[in-house]
């Protein structure tokens, strides 16, 4: 009996010692974060850029998947009604079936080769939808939630557009995914085969539109985005409002199916695709070896993974980044798809193993709630460094030579970095106040 008491006492002491050590480590990390003035510089530069709504210098359009990631920063620099009206514009172009467009553009600049859509509610604007994607509806719901989180303005949900309130239109957007982008076999949302969160099909030609060559598939990114949107929709439900569907039940079943079909317990990673009919790749190509970064990070944000799994995902992202001289965990995929398999996008180009802070920077939001802010800060450091060195928010980076590519004023990256730094600073202040 005496030995049992001694064992228990030693266990308590060791546990307390571990907690104290972790607390001391967290405080040291917190101090480093608050003393890293590069973070202040980046946020200041981001706010200057976030006075506009187009994706960046290379784009005329306002894209909902981009706006969703920089709306919090926009609300720091612009009047809330201005931001609110931009969100409402997407609802004014909503299809009868509930679908949401990708981008909005002034009709005078509607020269991108897209199949444009027009609305009597906004006669001077045109819109288009990249039909290979399945994230526009989810992105808009998430953006509305962020708008409400920052402003406290729930009146946006009661705005009436063409006889229908926005809250109902948000439900319609979610229902569209169940009606038109749903696999009855797997009970998961589907889309065209693309690279991770990308918007380009493998086959040559106009890669952003569904066509006769499209290979339908299920991936983690689309389903994670849908799960986050469902969670957000439920969180902002107006008092007294009755949903048309039991959305919490849909979300719960979605997580169950993701775990069943997309998560590989053996490899502790998400499989790239689950094909509904046939793969666009040759039978000898082993796609399962490819690691998807953006979709994996979004899966953590969606609440699909346990703490040990989250640590494993982050370690795998770091291991992949270490294989290329200039890579961070924002490298979309690794290894890249060979040119033979993905002729529409060669290796290390754009979404085929290009490095995107736009997605990699979300690691701060993903890890911090799990007590891994220190890991998130380490992941973010190389992204911070190159942003300072190149004095711009570039769309993506070449991991082989470190060169910045694409738009030099990419608002998606600016928004994600602004949010990531805000999250880390908030955590750091909390640690040092305890």
Image: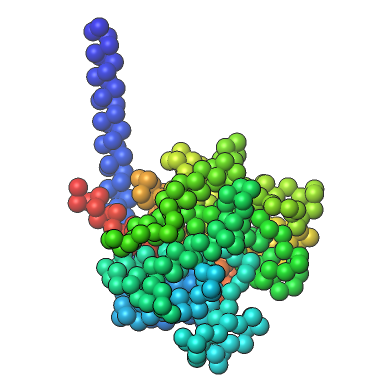
Considering the image in quadrants, where does the N terminus appear? Answer: top left
Query: Residue 405, how many percent across, how many down?
Result: 58, 73
Viewer-proximal residue, 15 or 92? 92
Scheme by which the image is coloured: rainbow
The answer to which image quadrant residue 40 occupies is bottom left
The answer to which image quadrant residue 35 occupies is bottom left
**Number of marks in picture:** 0
Residue positioned 69% across, 65% down in the render? 201
Q: Residue farthest to the bottom?
A: 108
On screen, residue 176 versus residue 374, left or right, reads right
Residue positioned 75% across, 53% down in the render? 278
Viewer-proximal residue, 112 or 93? 93
Q: Residue farthest to the left?
A: 433
Q: Residue farthest to the top?
A: 1
On screen, residue 334 versus residue 30, left or right, reads right
Query: Residue 46, how many percent across, how many down?
Result: 39, 74
Query: Residue 297, how many percent across, how many down?
Result: 49, 53
Viewer-proximal residue, 96 or 52? 96
Judge whether 358 appears above or below 308 on screen. Answer: below
Q: Is residue 181 visible?
A: yes
Query: Residue 343, how many percent across, how many down?
Result: 75, 65
Residue positioned 64% across, 80% down in the render? 115
Residue positioned 49% across, 66% down in the render? 173
Q: Is residue 326 visible?
A: no
Viewer-proximal residue, 122 or 57? 122
């Amino acid at each position: 009996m005496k030995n049992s008491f001694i064992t228990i006492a030693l266990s308590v002491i060791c546990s307390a010692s571990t907690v104290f050590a972790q607390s001391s480590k967290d405080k040291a990390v917190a101090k480093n974060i608050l003393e890293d003035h590069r973070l202040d510089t980046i946020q200041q530069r981001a706010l200057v850029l976030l006075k506009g709504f187009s994706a960046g210098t290379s784009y005329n359009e306002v894209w909902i998947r981009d706006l969703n990631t920089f709306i919090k920063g926009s609300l720091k620099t612009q009047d809330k009604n201005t931001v609110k009206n931009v969100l409402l514009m997407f609802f004014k172009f909503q299809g009868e079936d509930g679908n949401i467009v990708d981008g909005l553009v002034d009709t005078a600049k509607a020269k991108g080769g897209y199949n444009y859509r027009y609305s009597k509610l906004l006669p001077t604007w045109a819109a288009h939808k990249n039909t290979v994607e399945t994230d526009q509806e989810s992105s808009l719901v998430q953006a509305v939630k962020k708008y409400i989180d920052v402003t406290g303005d729930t009146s946006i949900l009661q705005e009436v557009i063409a006889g229908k309130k926005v809250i109902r239109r948000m439900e319609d957007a979610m229902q569209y995914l169940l009606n038109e982008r749903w696999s009855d076999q797997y009970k998961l949302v589907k889309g065209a085969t693309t690279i991770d969160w990308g918007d380009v099909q493998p086959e040559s030609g106009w890669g952003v539109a569904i066509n006769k060559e499209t290979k339908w598939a299920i991936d983690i990114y689309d389903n994670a985005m849908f799960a986050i949107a469902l969670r957000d929709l439920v969180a902002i439900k107006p008092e007294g409002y009755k949903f048309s569907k039991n959305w919490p039940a849909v979300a719960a079943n979605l997580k169950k199916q993701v775990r069943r079909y997309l998560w590989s317990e053996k490899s502790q990673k998400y499989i790239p695709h689950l094909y509904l009919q046939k793969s666009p790749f040759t039978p000898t190509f082993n796609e399962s070896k490819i690691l998807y970064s953006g979709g994996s990070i979004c899966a953590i944000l969606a609440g699909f993974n346990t703490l040990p799994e989250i640590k494993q995902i982050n370690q795998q992202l770091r291991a992949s980044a270490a294989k290329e001289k200039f890579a961070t965990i924002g490298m979309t995929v690794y290894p890249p798809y060979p040119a033979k398999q993905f002729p529409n996008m060669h290796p290390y180009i754009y979404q085929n193993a290009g490095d995107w802070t736009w997605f990699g920077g979300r690691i701060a939001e993903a890890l911090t709630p799990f007590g891994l802010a220190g890991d998130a800060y380490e992941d973010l450091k190389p992204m911070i460094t190159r942003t300072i060195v190149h004095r711009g928010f570039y769309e993506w980076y070449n991991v082989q030579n470190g060169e910045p590519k694409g738009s030099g004023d990419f608002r998606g990256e600016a928004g994600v970095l602004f949010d990531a730094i805000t999250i880390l600073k908030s955590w750091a202040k909390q640690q040092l106040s305890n």
